[in-house]
Image: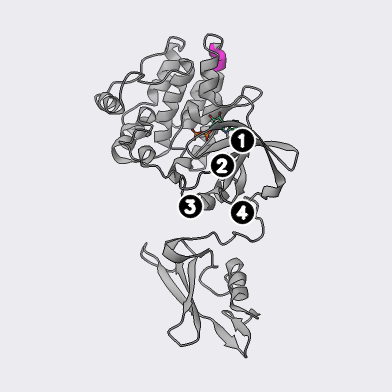
Amino acid sequence: AKEGAFVVRDSSQHGCYTVSVYTKALSRVDLGDIRHYQIKQKGLSQFFLAEKHVFNSIPEVIRYHQHNAAGLVTRLRYPVGPMGKCVPATAGFSYEKWEINPSELSIMEELGSGQFGVVRLGKWRALCKVAIKTINEGSMSEEDFIEEAKVMTKLSHPKLVQLYGVCIQQKPICIVTEFLENGCLLNYLQQRQGCLKKEFMLAMCQDACEGMEYLETNGFIHRDLAARNCLVSKKQVVKVCDFGMTRYVLDNQYISSTGSKFPVKWSPPEVFHYNKYSSKSDVWSFGVLMWEIFTEGRTPFENKSNSEVVDEITRGHRLYRPHLASQTIYKVMYSCWHEKPESRSSFAELLEEIKIISEND
Ligand code: ADP
């Protein structure tokens, strides 16, 4: 059901071929529509779909229309293969901006590993340090991610970990992002217990809030905001990472709200009950992130199981005030945990509140 998904098939007219294309563009219902175009032949070895664009072979016709609609309802974007598998139309063709040529990457030491696989330090064009995340086969719905990566590479903000692009020429595919010298925020906090100033903690909250405000403005939902998904730069700037990535995870323990890896302790009621994500569900998680920062990396609801947390939150209980957080700071994080999403502040509002506190304290 993707715009521009297509097959080339035998036509009902013997010896001819037809291209069938899926489109939502002309359909009045959400289900979409399939358009069929017979490949016409001129002489013995000339083929075309649009009379003005004639080629010597059918593959050439297809390749042309992968880049140009030229009279078709849409360009041919996704060849649909056996068993319904799709290959991105760009695979094996020219490099687009979001696609990184693997020959331009050199791989260095391992940085860590996560849900999708190992993350390594690398260099792009021998100049720029990058983080290269290898995606273990079967851990991600890759086609959907690759499609989204085109949008995600366009998101750019100093408080977001920049996605540079993806290498899809070989398997396993890998994701190339900005490299941050000080690694994961959660480890950073835990390793510096007792050493961090409160002003600095608030500045870290402000960094994350700025990144999140940018996502909110762009209508992009993070879905898994937490200290483990933030990174710290050489200059101790916090940047938000892994935004939107949970949508591509293939692991039921992670996706299902009753699964052991589901981030219940960072989730509002509408998420753990109904999977209803929004910028306001991100706001709830941001409150928990503030709590993680001000407890120097403690686990929220430390000794409670996920189902106990669901019970407690449903009964109106919330995380306690960390000793290092003033009443005003606690008020900000607490305001993120309003039961009703619409009663929570927006990131734009939270940012203003945080700025006022840091100016006055
Ligand atoms: P997860 O899937 O658990 O969120 P990731 O795959 O994003 O984990 O990352 C695993 C680990 O690799 C992180 O905890 C961090 O230590 C390291 N890492 C990931 N991305 C970067 C990066 N861009 N810069 C520096 N270190 C990174």
* Bounds of the magenta segment: 198-202
How far separated are the C-alphas under marks 1 and 3? 23 Å
Write down the quadrant of residue 231 in the picture. Answer: top right
Query: Which residue is depicted at the point 54% across and 67% down?
Result: 76
How far separated are the C-alphas under marks 1 and 2? 8 Å
Query: Which residue is depicted at the point 43% across and 9% down?
Result: 323
Nearest to the eye among marks 1 and 3: give it.
1
**Is disc 2 surrounded by few (<14), some (14 to 19) or many (20+) residues within 10 Å?**
many
Q: Which residue is mark 2?
A: 134
Question: In what element is the residue under mark 3?
Answer: helix
Q: Is residue 199 magenta?
A: yes
Query: Which residue is depicted at the point 42% across and 63% down?
Result: 83
Horizontal relation, residue 150 to residue 130: left or right:
left
Q: Earlier in the sequence, mark 1 or mark 3?
A: 1
Q: How is the image coloured?
A: one colour
Nearest to the eye among marks 3 and 2: give it.
2
Question: In what element is the residue under mark 4?
Answer: loop
How far separated are the C-alphas under marks 3 and 2? 16 Å
Q: Earlier in the sequence, mark 2 or mark 4?
A: 2
Q: Amino acid at mark 4?
A: Gln
Horizontal relation, residue 99 to residue 29: left or right:
right
Q: Which residue is mark 4?
A: 169
Q: Which residue is mark 1?
A: 120
Q: Which residue is mark 3?
A: 144
Q: Amino acid at mark 1?
A: Arg
